[in-house]
Image (cartoon, coloured by chain):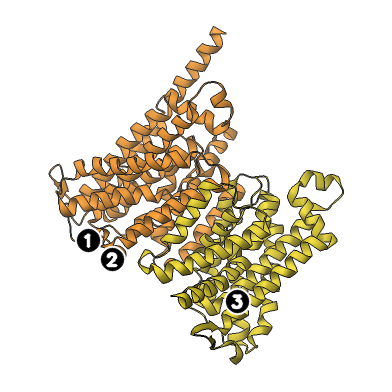
Chain colours: A orange, B yellow
Amino acid sequence: MANGNVTARASFVQQARWRPIEFVFWACTLLPFVVTPAYLSLASQVAITALFALSLDLILGYAGIVSLGHAAFFGMGAYTAGLIAKHYWTEPLSALCLAGLAAGILGYLTSHIIIRFRHLALIMLTMGFGLLLAEAANSASDLTGGADGLQGFRVPGVLGFKFDMFGRAAYAYALAVLFLCFLVARRVIHSPFGLALRGIRENATRMPAIGAPSRAHLRKAYTIAAVLAGIAGAVLTQTTSTVSLETLSFSRSADVLVILILGGAGRRLYGGIVGAIIYMVARDQFSGANPQYWYFWIGVMLVAVVMFLPNGILGGLSALHKKSQ
Amino acid sequence: MLSSLASVVFDGFAYGMLLFLLSVGLSVTLGMMNFVNLAHCSFAMVGGYASVQLAGKLGWPFLATLPVAFIAAAIVSIVLERILYRRLYRASDLDQCLLTIGIVFISIAAFAWFYTTEQQSVQVPEWLKGAQHVGGMTFANYRMFLIVVGLAVTGLLVFFLERTRFGAKVRAAVDNQRMARGLGIDVDRAFMFTFALGGGLAGLGGALSIQIVGLDPTFALGYLVYVLIVVAVGGLGSIGGSFAAAIVLGISDMAGKYYFPWLGAFVIYLVMVALLMWRPAGLFGKR
């Protein structure tokens, strides 16, 4: 018995260990600075989207909560950061924290309702909350600028580095935020709390039976994911100096789900990051001629992933890796 | 005040009929096979564009295009069901959502390619234009036509499901699939026909809606939300529930647009969230 305990513990610790490939991956994220300096603004978009997808991975990949309204938190963070920069001060780091806090409060409040539902009702409710918030932002045009978006502010830079047209500081900022949030999320999923979440995902009735406070866990996970999504939205606002209603839109919620599934959900949080890189770069290449036809390729990708790669690109790669050994 | 209320109810009722036609097929397939078909409005779009093609480009009379819209959408839904959907009946909700959203995206791009992204319209016969004025109230002819068609289709559907042998098999399959199989009912075939029927009705709804809301390739996504609300609120597999939900939704949407225009679609989403929180399985849902 004791022996079994030790092995379980050892495998748990083993899982949390950093792999060499991870160091290589994060080193590669620095490449855009030297290899493709002309695409640094795209690179910061990728980093922001990756953080947003990572936040969804926490609830979808680890806690099993399917959300079609995750953009609500992204938009909440984006508007909070925008309003602070427009009316109060332009120092970005404190605004970033407040944006995360605002999104987290919204996440905590809605989590009480969300976690009571499953299946279609859950999908519909998350979508409903997202649409409600988008409509509210549209109606409150005095505060949010309505359909024109929030404009007329500029965040000059962070810690003395200026956000200029080359986008070096913007990408460095987005990447640093992504990496720090990744470390936090990684700590969360490899903690006993993260293990409990996976238990709830696998069997929602058994976990309470062995004494895990299922609902409290889910509420916490949902709130943490909301905070991270809000931070992603705030970084977008601060590096582009504008907030549009699109940050709250249904299509943003759908896109981030597509990105995460494309990369692979529940794969040590890398699925969202890999998905974001492939999706954003492909969109940049294909949608030049006409954005309408870009949707054709996303559609084909989705059908192909569901039919042939049920665990996303990372799942496919790891299956290939196992086969070759 | 009273006459404006009557017009809102009348317009909302006609709109609700449209929503019912668009969503009833999804409700039945969701209830029957537990398949989350988000591409349902793409079938409606197939019907709509079939009508545009025949009436606008080939000069058919509008009413003659309606059966073709039904058949075209039914054929497309059978083909998709055979090729893709049946492989995913046992997959998770999420996989089904993703596959069908992929189909929605493909259909949007395909129709944009063939018909551009502009709003399409059709020419309706003279007697469907204009309106009747009764005691200060206005009733548009086309909306009355919609209500008549909607009620007729509902009647036929209820008759088919409640009074025919095939309908009994379908109901048995919805209620308890394993038991129905055990009794020797060919559930797969029943499902294929129901799927085609639901797709066809959506196609009919798509063709009828051109005159009210117009038609462009984003229809497949724009109306998906409304259709899902009807299904989720009405309860899976419940025709009566879908009917009631569609009418409630149609009228509350019209009332919201008429009395609180600054709220936009806020009212309809609020109604949905409130109803779902109150009854997660829908108004008439069993599960």
Residue that mark 2 sits on: A148
Q: Is residue B118 visible?
A: no
- The subunit letter for the residue under badge 1 reads A
- The subunit letter for the residue under badge 2 reads A
Q: Is residue B185 above or below residue A319?
A: below
Q: Are marks 2 and 3 in contact (CB under 8 Å)?
A: no
Number of the front mark, 2 or 3? 3
Give the total of numbered labels: 3
Question: Residue farthest to the bottom?
Answer: B126
Where in the figure is residue A212, as x and y percent of width and height? 50, 24
Q: On the same chain: label 1 and label 3? A: no
For the residues labelled 1 and 2, the Cα–Cα distance comes to 8 Å
Residue A151 is labelled as 1
Q: Quadrant of the N terminus of chain A?
A: top right
Q: Nearer the viewer, residue B90 or B270?
A: B270
Which residue sits at x=56%, y=12%? A4
Question: Residue farthest to the left?
Answer: A160
Which residue sits at x=47%, y=60%? B268
B75 horizontally vs A150: left or right: right
Q: Is residue B11 above or below residue B171?
A: below
Residue neighbourhood size for the residue with mark 1, other residues' Cα within 10 Å, grouped as few (<14), some (14–19), many (≥20): some
Q: Is residue A48 above or below residue B242?
A: above
Where in the figure is residue A90, as x and y percent of width and height? 15, 49
Where in the figure is residue A291, as x and y percent of width and height? 42, 66
Residue B208 is labelled as 3
Q: On the same chain: label 2 and label 3? A: no
